[in-house]
Every structure is written in structure tokens, then in C-alpha cells.
Amino acid sequence: MSLDAQYISELLSAALPDCQIKVDGGAGKFQVIAVGDVFSGLGAVKRQQLVYQHLNPHIQSGAVHAVTMRLMTPAEAAAA
């Protein structure tokens, strides 16, 4: 099963409704940029775990096999 960036974007937007989500890629390889207060106070690993928990079923099925993430708070995004 092949997933597209739009599907991943909708999945993550539903799971993290207060985040701005942008997803690029395809063929199992995706780049995710997410900005939201949900990441406040979390280190990089905890932020990734928050996103991976929603992607894991697709990773386990083989539909997703590579994900690059930039996960930021609004303040971090404004400073970038």
C-alpha cells in the first residue's frame, strides 16, 4: 500500500489538531514539518515519539519507511 503526502498530512492534522502540519514526499519517504504548542517542554526524542505513535501502523506495514521531521514550537519557528 502506497501512501501520499496528503494522507500523512491529514492523519497528523487529525492527531495533532493544534499544529500546523506540512508534509512532502512520497513512495514511503516523507518530510514532516510540524509547528505547535504541543511540543513545548519536550526534547527532540519526545517530540518525535509523539509523531511516530500516529505513523507506526504505517511504518509496520511497510507503507512508510523513512520520515524526516522538523518539530517546533511557534516561538522556535518564528526564530528559525
Image (cartoon, rainbow, N blue to C red):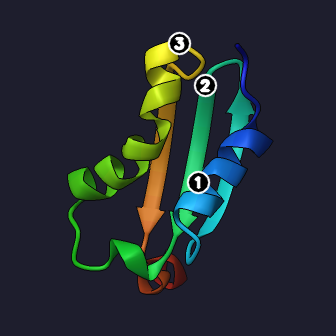
Please tell me which of labels 2 and 3 falls first in the chain. 2
Task: Classify 77 as above or below 48.
Answer: below
Residue for point 39% across, 42% down: 52
**Spatial CA span between label 2 and label 1:** 15 Å
Q: Please state if 10 lies on the left or on the right of 47 as rendered.
A: right
Find out whether the residues at labels 2 and 1 contact each other: C-beta distance under 8 Å: no
Q: Please state if 1 lies on the left or on the right of 77 as rendered.
A: right
Q: Please state if 68 lies on the left or on the right of 21 as rendered.
A: left
- Amino acid carrying label 1: it is Leu
Residue for point 59% across, 72% down: 17
**Spatial CA span between label 2 and label 3:** 11 Å
Q: Point out residue 37 in the picture as x, y percentages from the top left corner.
A: 42, 82
- Residue at the disc numbered 2: 29
Q: Point out residue 40 in the picture as x, y percentages from the top left corner.
A: 31, 79
Q: Point out residue 72 in the picture as x, y percentages from the top left corner.
A: 43, 69
Residue for point 51% across, 15% down: 61
- Of the residues tagged 2 and 1, which is closer to the observer? 1
Please tell me which of labels 3 and 1 falls first in the chain. 1
- Residue at the disc numbered 3: 62
Task: Classify 26 as above or below 31.
Answer: above
State the mark number for residue 12.
1
**Spatial CA span between label 3 and label 1:** 18 Å
Question: Within 10 Å of the Cα at label 2, are there few (<14), some (14-19), or many (20+) other Cα atoms?
Answer: some
Label 2, secondary structure: give it: strand
- Amino acid carrying label 3: it is Gly
Label 3, secondary structure: give it: loop
